[in-house]
Image (tube, rainbow, N blue to C red):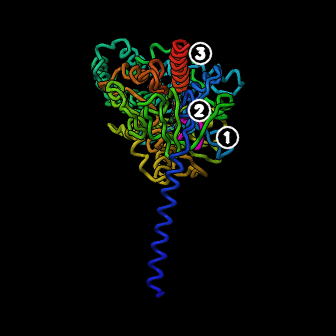
Amino acid sequence: MNNKLFRHIVGFLSLFIVFFVTVSSSLASQSVSPKKYKVIIIGAGISGLSAAKIMKENNIPFLVLEGRNRIGGRLYTVYPWGVGLDLGATWIHCINQNPIAEMVSRLKLETVPTAYNDNILSAKFKSFTLYDADGKRVPATSVSSLSLIVQQFDDYVLSHPNVFASMSMADAYAVFAKQIALPQAKSELLRYMINNVYLYEYAADMPLLSAQSGIAYLASPVSGPNVLFPGGYNQILPPLVKNVPMELNQKVTEIDYRGKTIDIYTENEHYQADYVIVTVPVGVLQSGAIRFTPALPDAKQHAIKQLRMGVYDKIYLLFDKPFWDKDSEWIGYMPAKNQTDGMWDIMNYYKVTGVPALLVFTSGSLAENVEQWLDKDIVHHVMAMLKKIYGDAIPEPSSYVITRWNDDPFSKGSYSYLPVGASMKNYQLLAQPVANRLFFAGEATSTQDPATVHGAYLSGIRAAKEVMKVASVKQQAAA
Ligand SMILES: Cc1cc2nc3c(=O)[nH]c(=O)nc-3n(C[C@H](O)[C@H](O)[C@H](O)COP(=O)(O)OP(=O)(O)OC[C@H]3O[C@@H](n4cnc5c(N)ncnc54)[C@H](O)[C@@H]3O)c2cc1C
């Protein structure tokens, strides 16, 4: 046999072998019968884990499927410097009547109160050292007197829900600013303070944010101060995952609820369940990463489209020792006139944890833009800002950690916000079950505390109880 013919035969044989192996292995994987459970919970964030807690307590056969190789979702603590750095949530927002605070006190975890408080948005300015664009200190008395007006604006918007129903927060502020008619210098400072508060609370620029955004929280059961965890938020997770059946690295791609049982497909597995609790972020639902067959009802799809994911990121910078205003919780740098895109926010991490680090925040369109930058450019920009304030002689950071939540395929943003044109109804619609078999939880399904850890936690419990109610009615009917 000549060489050429031999090579043809070998080539043909190897093609045949590849074809045979591919077909037979795909047939084999199809013939493996799907794993079957009463309930499948999609997502091991705090809402998925609170739903799991209810399932576990009631001995219901269930499984949690998580796409990432870790639990916690938007609760994510890393320890690169020997201390906990929270890359996701930082605060327990308002510790009274808060289920997370109750958990923390049972676990005896260390927390530290902060001036920043969601109940009183202007409280942040009680411990806030502000510098102007030239790095000159803005008198503390100016900040403190205007913080009263910040609070007045918040109360004003909340007490006129119908007047501002279809307006943006920026438009509502324009109406308010006309009424108080401050002199130019003061009005610029107030504008900065208002923008700072709303941008960082809701992770969206004021022109995009519905003036109704705060209304969601009026019915919230929680109150009191905010606290954070020097040892990291993830410390609350171990008791929640104990004895929870779970598969990591299982990214769900399709939920088919046409049949008697629901078929759930991940990238490489097939599962079946009678009920499914979907807890993935609304950003993931918007991206179409999970195909629903049949498509979700129009009202649900509309609610998914209308809500938005805000972007809120963190940059931790570690230094040998602090060179900044050590006693101030916040350090503000007021961008030059009309440059809201320069609205970076700096938290003195040293004050709350004793670690010589700064925690720099970006939010809204600023965060979206900054996510596109290289790490070194982000650090350089922050350092240039700090040099304006503290002088060129300040040291470079010895290390840094940067988040990019918008770029994360399992999150697609940081947390939900209500854009202009949407209403509270969107959260309700997102929470509603479909066909009494698909149930929805997660922060964006909370009608009292969206965008928070405790709101997400309570939503998981709500969805789990909905499943149990439907399942027990079915069981009774069958008996
Ligand atoms: C930077 C940042 C700061 C924040 N700060 C605070 C704060 O200080 N206080 C506060 O109360 N809240 C804060 N939040 C919001 C809070 O973290 C969230 O509201 C809460 O953690 C959301 O929980 P969840 O269970 O709804 O969603 P998630 O935690 O996102 O859980 C959903 C899970 O679903 C998984 N998933 C996604 N897609 C798939 C798929 N296709 N298949 C399988 N699994 C999938 C994800 O990996 C994730 O684990 C912050 C969030 C961020 C990002």
Number of marks drawn: 3
Mark in the foreground, 1 or 2: 2
The earlier-in-sequence mark between 3 and 2 is 2
Residue type beneath disc 3: Asn
- Magenta highlight on residue 294: no
The earlier-in-sequence mark between 1 and 2 is 2
Q: Is residue 322 above or below residue 98?
A: below
Quarter residue 258 falls in: top left
Q: Nearer the viewer, residue 384 or 69?
A: 69
Marks 3 and 2, Cα distance to the nearest angstrom? 32 Å
Mark 1 in CB contact with mark 3 (< 8 angstroms): no
Please name the residue shown 47% across and 31% down the image.
262
Residue type beneath disc 1: Val
Please name the residue shown 39% across and 41% down the image.
366
Q: Which mark is residue 96?
A: 3
Marks 1 and 2, Cα distance to the nearest angstrom? 32 Å
Badge 2 local density, few (<14 within 10 Å), some, or many (20+)? many
